[in-house]
Image (cartoon, rainbow, N blue to C red):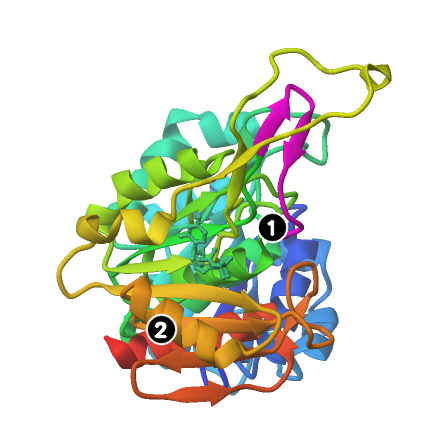
């Protein structure tokens, strides 16, 4: 993450989710962000200031009345790049919406001249209450970014309604977006990403597919959102959780994928085709499961359509198209042929023969191929590789 040198005020109010804010403080500090934690009096009952002090290696503030800090709330309201409140309790939201300034955190919020993000976390009844909804709508109108809450179990028991605070990982992606988008060429761009394998059915229970995990495409979708893009992710079947911020479209066959891309492409400024569509499908599909004792089976396969080639005309003028190529040998030459044949601006080449690279790995060793350039990168995590692909897309834009 390129957040080094940024400053964030992390306000914590007194909900049980405040223990999760320790993870946020830790992750931000690891990313090179200077984090000033401000606790309300009730938050300090849940998590002691010293915990945050150890995680951020900076003093933690809890009161307007600390000696020698008479104007701290004004400095903290205008110096950071961002103010994040996680969790934001119903009480904190109410006080902020009314413009109260009866403790350090609300005083900072009232004087704030920088962007504010809140992650509400509370009991589901308290969240659904019209007073809380009204307060949130006031804060949204004021330009605050609201992340979550999520649906799921609460400390007090099971729940199927929103209330629990969004997970720290999700909150981190939103923080990254607020910090990075203003400097990114992807801010406000519409990015269409495809990911994962597709499946072609032989019968109701047997399929032709490939071992693509979807990880590379999911990483690109999340990284693009973190740069301020609007992201649609068309995904074949995978076991991955949906990436933060992406609108999901689920598909099964290569034909479904083609239809989804055709529909979304006219709106896209950037297409990243990271999916590994099945290239063949059985000419006939058996409607019933064939028993094993039926003996040998002959299957005739036909090629599926090439999604990139058959949607060429649906691309917007001036848009950028990125393809992937998985090659066993003679990679650069074959990838360059695909660049031309599929009218791409960038091909991301994976060499299957490379250790730590390709389908199911967590890491990837990629080569970036444009019309004018070939650049081989070192072995890196797929999320980091995603950043490098998007750096190249920004250059091409
Ligand atoms: N692709 C596609 N439609 C297909 C197959 C692949 O749009 N039916 C896309 C992939 O998403 C990728 C690029 O084309 O971005 C290259 O995929 P690859 O499988 O390497 O190329 P193929 O064209 O299928 O060529 P081959 O398998 O013969 O190497």
Q: Residue at x 38, y 60 (%)?
A: 272
Residue located farthest toward the left when viewing the structure as drawn: 317
Question: In front of the other: label 1 or label 2?
Answer: 2
Magenta stretch?
200-213
Quadrant holding the C terminus:
bottom left
211 or 153: nearer the eye? 211
Residue 216, placed above or below residue 204: below
Label number found at residue 120: none
13 in magenta = no
Locate residue 261, reporting x and y percent: 33, 44
298 or 5: nearer the eye? 298
Q: Is residue 259 left or right of residue 58?
A: left
Q: Which residue is mark 2?
A: 346
Q: Quadrant of residue 37?
A: bottom right
Q: Residue at x 27, y 78 (%)?
A: 396
Whole-number angstrom distance, CA of label 1 to CA of label 2: 34 Å
Instruction: For mark 2, give the secondary structure.
Output: strand
Looking at the rendered structure, the number of numbered marks drawn on it comes to 2
Q: Residue at x 50, y 47 (%)?
A: 277
Locate residue 108, reporting x and y percent: 39, 67
Q: Which residue is mark 1?
A: 167
Q: Residues within 10 Å of mark 1 (few under 14, many from 20)?
A: some
Locate residue 295, reporting x and y percent: 82, 20
265 or 16: nearer the eye? 265
Instruction: For mark 1, give the secondary structure.
Output: loop
Q: Is mark 1 within 8 Å of ligand 1?
A: no
Of pointers 1 and 2, the one earlier in the residue sequence: 1
The reply to whether residue 65 is visible in this rendering is no
Q: Is residue 234 left or right of residue 141?
A: right
Locate residue 238, reporting x and y percent: 61, 43
């Amino acid at each position: 993450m390129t957040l080094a040198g940024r400053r964030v005020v992390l306000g914590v109010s007194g909900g049980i989710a405040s223990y999760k804010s320790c993870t946020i403080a830790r992750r931000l500090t690891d990313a090179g962000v200077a984090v000033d934690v401000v606790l309300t009096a009730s938050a300090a009952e849940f998590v002691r200031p010293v915990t945050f002090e150890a995680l951020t290696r900076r003093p933690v503030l809890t009161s307007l009345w600390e000696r020698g800090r008479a104007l701290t709330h004004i400095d903290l309201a205008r110096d950071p790049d961002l103010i994040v409140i996680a969790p934001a309790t119903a009480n904190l939201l109410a006080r902020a919406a009314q413009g109260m300034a009866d403790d350090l955190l609300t005083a900072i919020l009232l004087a704030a001249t920088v962007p504010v993000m809140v992650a509400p976390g509370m009991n589901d009844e308290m969240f659904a209450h019209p007073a809380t909804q009204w307060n949130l709508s006031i804060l949204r109108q004021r330009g605050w970014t609201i992340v979550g809450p999520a649906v799921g179990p609460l400390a007090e028991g099971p729940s199927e309604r929103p209330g629990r605070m969004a997970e720290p990982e999700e909150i981190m992606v939103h923080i990254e977006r607020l910090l990075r988008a203003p400097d990114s060429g992807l801010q406000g761009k519409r990015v269409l990403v495809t990911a994962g394998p597709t499946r072609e059915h032989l019968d109701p229970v047997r399929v032709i597919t490939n071992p693509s995990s979807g990880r590379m495409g999911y990483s690109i979708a999340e990284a693009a959102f973190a740069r301020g893009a609007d992201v649609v992710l068309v995904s074949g079947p995978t076991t991955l959780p949906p990436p933060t911020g992406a609108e999901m479209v689920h598909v099964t066959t290569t034909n479904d994928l083609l239809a989804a891309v055709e529909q979304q492409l006219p709106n896209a400024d950037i297409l990243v085709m990271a999916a590994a569509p099945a290239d063949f499908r059985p000419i006939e599909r058996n409607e019933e499961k064939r028993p094993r004792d039926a003996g040998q089976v002959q299957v005739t396969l036909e090629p599926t359509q090439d999604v990139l080639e058959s949607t060429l005309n649906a691309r917007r003028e001036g848009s950028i198209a990125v393809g992937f190529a998985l090659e066993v040998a003679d990679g650069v030459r074959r990838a360059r042929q695909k660049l031309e044949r599929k009218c791409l601006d960038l091909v991301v080449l994976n060499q299957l023969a490379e250790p730590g690279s390709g389908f199911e790995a967590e890491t990837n060793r990629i080569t970036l191929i444009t019309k004018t350039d070939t650049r081989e990168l070192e072995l890196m995590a797929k999320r980091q590789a995603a950043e490098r692909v998007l750096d190249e897309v920004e250059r091409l834009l």
